[in-house]
Image (cartoon, rainbow, N blue to C red):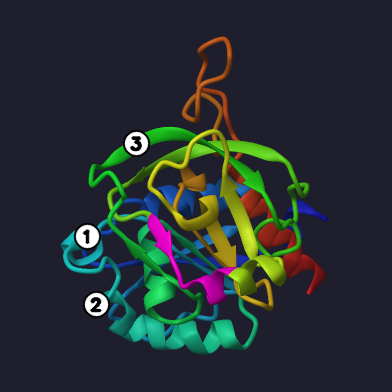
Amino acid sequence: MSAATLASARIGVITFPGTLDDRDAARAVRLAGGEPVSLFHADGDLQGVDAVVLPGGFSYGDYLRAGAISRFAPAMDAVVDAAKGGMPVLGICNGFQILTEAHLLPGSMVKNDHLHFVCREQVLAVENADTAWTNQYAAGQHITIPLKNQDGQFVADERTLDELEGEGRVAFRYVGVNPNGSRRDIAGITNAAGNVVGLMPHPEHAVESGFGPEAADGSRTGVDGLGFFTSVLASLIRA
């Protein structure tokens, strides 16, 4: 996998009104070796990108069901069409909420069960290492990335949860503590094709030594989130 080939991969990052983490996601793409492309919610043209990230933040103020308005943005029409055609799409936090509202992923996100905002370094178990966004991890691997949300409780009916479990579509599960009451400790899921992944924690905040989660010696050297972005580049190279 040459650096020149990686650099030709163009990963779009969509900014919605109120988005906080679009620049962090773009930086993560750059650190992984790809070319980030800034996209705007009101623009229906994805500019020929190879994959799309819906970053975390507080789109439209995070009122009502977070992401419920964002799903109607012109850019989302293009994202839904592209995702159904196989384009890799990653939704982080608010982006995960948008993916469920757009029906690219099942279930929904509601207030944390304790009704408080939570911000912590969260351990996750990688349950599915065969998606476009997780193929650089190993199944069963534990990773630590930041989590920050108020509407992070993943809910679905029992039939949907059974389908996710039976089809191997639980991508990540919380380890040690369930920070928001999500059903069956689910932190992230994938669609059946494995090209669309959504999760509540923020991998884009654990991609650069010195700024990630703390190590045992107190240094903030955790870079476990970088695997998301190297995974999608690897999947594009193989495609």
**What x and y, as percent, mark residue 156?**
45, 70
Q: Secondary structure at mark 3?
A: strand
Q: Report the residue at 27% width, 44% height from top.
A: 114
Q: Residue at x 62, y 38 (%)?
A: 143
Q: Residue type at mark 3?
A: Cys
Which residues lie in the magenta part? 153-161
Could you tell which of marks 1 and 3 lies nearer the N-terminus? Answer: 1
Q: Is residue 18 visible?
A: yes
Mark 1: give few (<14), some (14-19) or many (20+) Cα within 10 Å: few
Q: Is residue 21 above or below residue 99?
A: above
Q: Amino acid at mark 2?
A: Ile
* Residue 31 occupies quadrant: top right
Q: Is residue 38 left or right of residue 144?
A: left
Q: Earlier in the sequence, mark 1 or mark 2?
A: 1
Instruction: Please tell me whether residue 82 is drawn above or below residue 169 in the rendered image.
Output: below
Residue denoted by label 2: 69
Q: Mark 3 — residue?
A: 119
Query: How far is the residue under mark 1 from the one under mark 2?
Result: 12 Å
Spot occupied by residue 116 in the image (x, y as percentages of width and height): 23, 42
x%, y% of residue 133?
A: 64, 60
Q: Amino acid at mark 1?
A: Gly
